[in-house]
Image: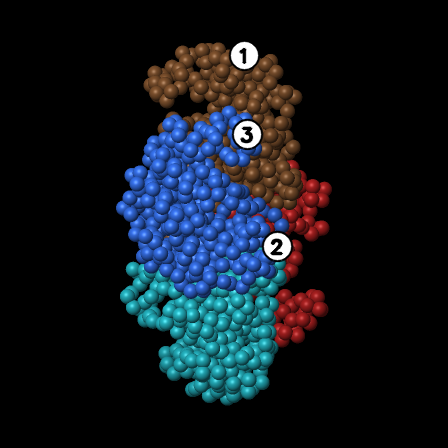
Chain colours: A cyan, B blue, C brown, D red
Amino acid sequence: MRVADPAPAAAEFAAAQGVPLSKSLDDVLRDPQVQGVVLCTPHTQHTEQIIRAADAAKHVFCEKPLAPTTDECLRILDAEMARGRRLVQVGFNRRYDLAYRQMKSTLLDGTLGTPLMAHCAHRNPSVPPHYVGGMPITDTAIHEIDIVRWLLDQEITAARVLKPRRTSRAKPELQDPLIVLMEMADGALVDVEVFVTLAYGYDIRCEVVCELGTVALGNGSPVVLRKDNLRSDRVPNDFQERFAQSYENEVQEWVDGVASGEASGPSAWDGYAATAVADACLAALDSGERVGVEMRQRPAFYGQAAALAAVGGAR
Amino acid sequence: MRVADPAPAAAEFAAAQGVPLSKSLDDVLRDPQVQGVVLCTPHTQHTEQIIRAADAAKHVFCEKPLAPTTDECLRILDAEMARGRRLVQVGFNRRYDLAYRQMKSTLLDGTLGTPLMAHCAHRNPSVPPHYVGGMPITDTAIHEIDIVRWLLDQEITAARVLKPRRTSRAKPELQDPLIVLMEMADGALVDVEVFVTLAYGYDIRCEVVCELGTVALGNGSPVVLRKDNLRSDRVPNDFQERFAQSYENEVQEWVDGVASGEASGPSAWDGYAATAVADACLAALDSGERVGVEMRQRPAFYGQAAALAAVGGAR
Amino acid sequence: MRVADPAPAAAEFAAAQGVPLSKSLDDVLRDPQVQGVVLCTPHTQHTEQIIRAADAAKHVFCEKPLAPTTDECLRILDAEMARGRRLVQVGFNRRYDLAYRQMKSTLLDGTLGTPLMAHCAHRNPSVPPHYVGGMPITDTAIHEIDIVRWLLDQEITAARVLKPRRTSRAKPELQDPLIVLMEMADGALVDVEVFVTLAYGYDIRCEVVCELGTVALGNGSPVVLRKDNLRSDRVPNDFQERFAQSYENEVQEWVDGVASGEASGPSAWDGYAATAVADACLAALDSGERVGVEMRQRPAFYGQAAALAAVGGAR
Amino acid sequence: MRVADPAPAAAEFAAAQGVPLSKSLDDVLRDPQVQGVVLCTPHTQHTEQIIRAADAAKHVFCEKPLAPTTDECLRILDAEMARGRRLVQVGFNRRYDLAYRQMKSTLLDGTLGTPLMAHCAHRNPSVPPHYVGGMPITDTAIHEIDIVRWLLDQEITAARVLKPRRTSRAKPELQDPLIVLMEMADGALVDVEVFVTLAYGYDIRCEVVCELGTVALGNGSPVVLRKDNLRSDRVPNDFQERFAQSYENEVQEWVDGVASGEASGPSAWDGYAATAVADACLAALDSGERVGVEMRQRPAFYGQAAALAAVGGAR
């Protein structure tokens, strides 16, 4: 393990843990013992760094978004395909959450028939001051964009964004809440409530409606409290409380994949697709109209394997 | 109590119960002891019959829809207003359901802040063969049209209808499911999933999302079964199982209202508004576009009193 | 309908509703149009009044307990059997609650196999000042005594009462909570938590554990609230909120039974058995020991029919 | 890391992973780099092995039971106290389960007031052929014995065991189900349903009843399925599905504790107490009577610190 960090304090912290320091990313990439690289850099630097890592045949893990524009994403795809094997994984952590995995395996086992709709809600109690403009799409709905692609195993082809009455609790420059409507390639419809200043807690909901029944994220909490004329489940405070385990699974499975040379998990293609859909949503938010998603044809290189393989770990 | 029925069998059944028979509606209306009339006639006959009853100063209860067209509804409104007091009640039974009433009283007590959105689903396991065309709007979504007007205490101003991938279980001439999107006068947005051949049961869902929290119809059933690795609540089979009590409440409160001379419950105005919104939804289903609801200005005669008074009975 | 009431105010109220007044119970019983009598008298007067009504061949409904002692209960049984048909019904309202009825029908349909245990809790937020001594048995656990006899369709043969640590919220002369343990004729065991000053609400719980699964009263409330990091069902405030509908069903079915001449519902035998079991529980509370229930052999006259017939109305 | 295993296959497997092999436990204990030892040996060998490890000042982790008899447990306590610091941890994994930890922290935060009762159920779908005799106590209820000591932070002082009607699904030599009643030092009462052949699944339930409310393990599952007129949470199949995460937490926290030299988690005292209570339960099962728990006075050495410290990790 090696660490390269331009911030001296972070570098010293790593050194104090006994991790050897490198001067730069290139220094790390030159080390033949290094098999994979975790980029914790701003997404504006992802493209160049990922391409250099791919050129060095190293695995790369980076947080979403893969890159700021679809053009840059495509450059990454091209670099990866040029190496002939999957090297890039994007941090869509929800695919590693036990509950979403059980939804996926339920959909796959076929007892509910064909999925026709999905209803989602993404609710936060509050957002930081710098959260403005299109961030309800690019930072919040982006999770639903990825997860419905994964759950329904197909692309999103068009989007529309509706603006409900605004909450008085959001600052004036933020349209909150939003309803994002998405069309899937096979005609299934997805609606996503995005409401980032809904006081009561961090509540993530998702129900997929099929021909014979539905499967949804559960509502129950680890303990139930009876008090003051209420029988209550707890709603988490934030994404850490809700998704802590998924991050651990994500990193562990990435490490395992690097060790075995078998990349799985959200691919560069998934990163590209999410960016393309987010672009369509932003345009739809702007225009009030239905906007088609513009995407390159999916190369055979990216198969369907990643999505299906990732279910393997589900219980 | 008197019964008039053109069908001899029905008339004979009533007579066997000791109910005096009348030859015709006019015969009933001439009886000075009769205070109110329950019309169980096809809705195409409602307008003339209601107007005759109103002219005779009798209370009238009829099932939804009030009349087939908004023009006929307006004729009823005019006849009622001409009599100077409320005489007509339309059978929107959900306003008499304990759960919806608790939702309403929760919204009224103000602890959740302003409502911004409502998410509804109306799911039936199956529909009869004659259920076709616009009936998902006029026979099914019509309940949600009324109940969100009542819950949010305002008119619906525009509608849009989306067509998700069709279920293979519906007959070809039926677009099933649908998503109906409605805009309220104050900007709140309502989405309604209408899915009338969703195999698993009769499931009515409604969540109103406010600034500080949400209130929703509960999911629990009277008993919980643990069996075969499942902990299960029962989903009702049909509207009788789900709403039986609301029908009893509806009739009882109507009778009480007739006795006291104080009409409450869904008014002729509510019947007119539901028809106007349904017309907009049908046009939207046809065109795929957003359609504004065309309605006369609400006369002071219909106040806001009905909706609020009806909450009085809620626990 | 006739009313006899020694309290002038009550009598005048009834008269004002247009109900003819009678001077005394005997006056009522002499009226050949009267088919049934509802006794709203102190239970110390039940025995004589019921026997007089039975002698007059009138149906009688009275609240629990049937009579203060098992000896008096047996006099009532003898009087009823002497008339040759069932005339007496005791007010165990829970048998008319939809949820208990669904439990009963689930147990009867056989899919869960033989019942082996039942876990019950009877929780009140508070009790009035005059609630002391054995009242946790005679006024509170008495409901569970009846309902488990009915659910499991057999007699209780022995009881034991345990005294947990006392709550600091009860007055010193009240042992609260209690745990009542009861043995059924076939060996099934029942435990009942009786806790009458448990602050959070009126909460009635019951789970019957069978060989293949369990069935329990549900926990859900009509609406669900999301607020302040909680997703909450409401716990009722008191027995009126929880059991209002059961009282209406009880009276309606009694009236129907009187009209048809077919008595159903909790019989004089059920009233006798509950008193006998309560006596055993009181002795067990006193002694700390296991106490056998002393009961006369069940006469064929009382069959098993009542319990099973009452399920007929369940959905 | 070193492995010593008398079974050649296991030893070879470890060697293949690159773990150095030792010939014997003593060989391991002589290695100055070894700080802690995980015993995966039969519990009949625990006592000698633990004492040898303690003599070598190594930390020891072993599965429950600590030792077959309380006398052997006391020898372990003495050996540990002779070394002057805590070295032994027993594998009561439930203390590492998120849900039990939330129960504990809820009880500690004081909003519910004093605990007065606990209701538990330990249900298995089936047991292996060698599961007989007292194993419902020593292998099954043993978990509840430990967890209620931990949740209520006090010793169990007496026990009684009731025998409900036996299920026809258990083999004749097994009394199944059982109800275990336990008295806590402060008078709180605990009832535990132990039912190891209850077909429907692995279901662990626990509710602590306090003066102002209750806290219980939740019932919800990660996903909710709507199908066939049911809205269902999944009940786990077995303890692995239910408690997998707790085992990971347990090992990780033990390793962290060894590294820091700060032992926490279930102590040798907890192992001794569980064995003493199990002995009382076995005697009570045999005699049908209430049996007092015989235990040495708790040495100051074992403080109350362990139980409280372990809550630190709870969310």
Question: Do the residues bearing badges 2 and 3 touch, measured as CB atoms within 8 Å?
Answer: no
Tag 1: residue type? Asp
Would you place residue D159 above or below residue B70 in this image? above
The residue pinned by badge 1 equals: C55
Residue at image location 62% in from the left, 58% down from the top: A111
Which of C13/B212 is in front? Answer: C13
- Does dot 1 land on a helix, a strand or a loop? helix
Q: Which mark is residue B12?
A: 3
Position of residue C179 in the picture relative to residue C214 (left or right)? left
How far across and down, in percent of the image, does residue B135 sit? 50, 53
Say which chain tag 1 marks. Answer: C
How far across and down, in percent of the image, does residue B26 sit? 42, 33
Say which chain tag 3 marks. Answer: B
Residue depth check, mark 1 versus mark 2: number of the one nearer the observer: 1
Q: Quadrant of the C terminus of chain C?
A: top right
Question: Do the residues bearing badges 3 and 1 touch, measured as CB atoms within 8 Å?
Answer: no
- Does dot 2 land on a helix, a strand or a loop? loop
Task: State how far apart marks 3 and 1 are (Cα).
Answer: 40 Å
Which of A235/B245 is in front? Answer: B245
Residue depth check, mark 2 versus mark 3: number of the one nearer the observer: 3
Q: Which mark is residue D237?
A: 2
Position of residue D252 in the picture relative to residue D2 (left or right)? left
Which of A51/C13 is in front? Answer: C13
Q: Are marks 2 and 3 on the same chain?
A: no
Tag 3: residue type? Glu
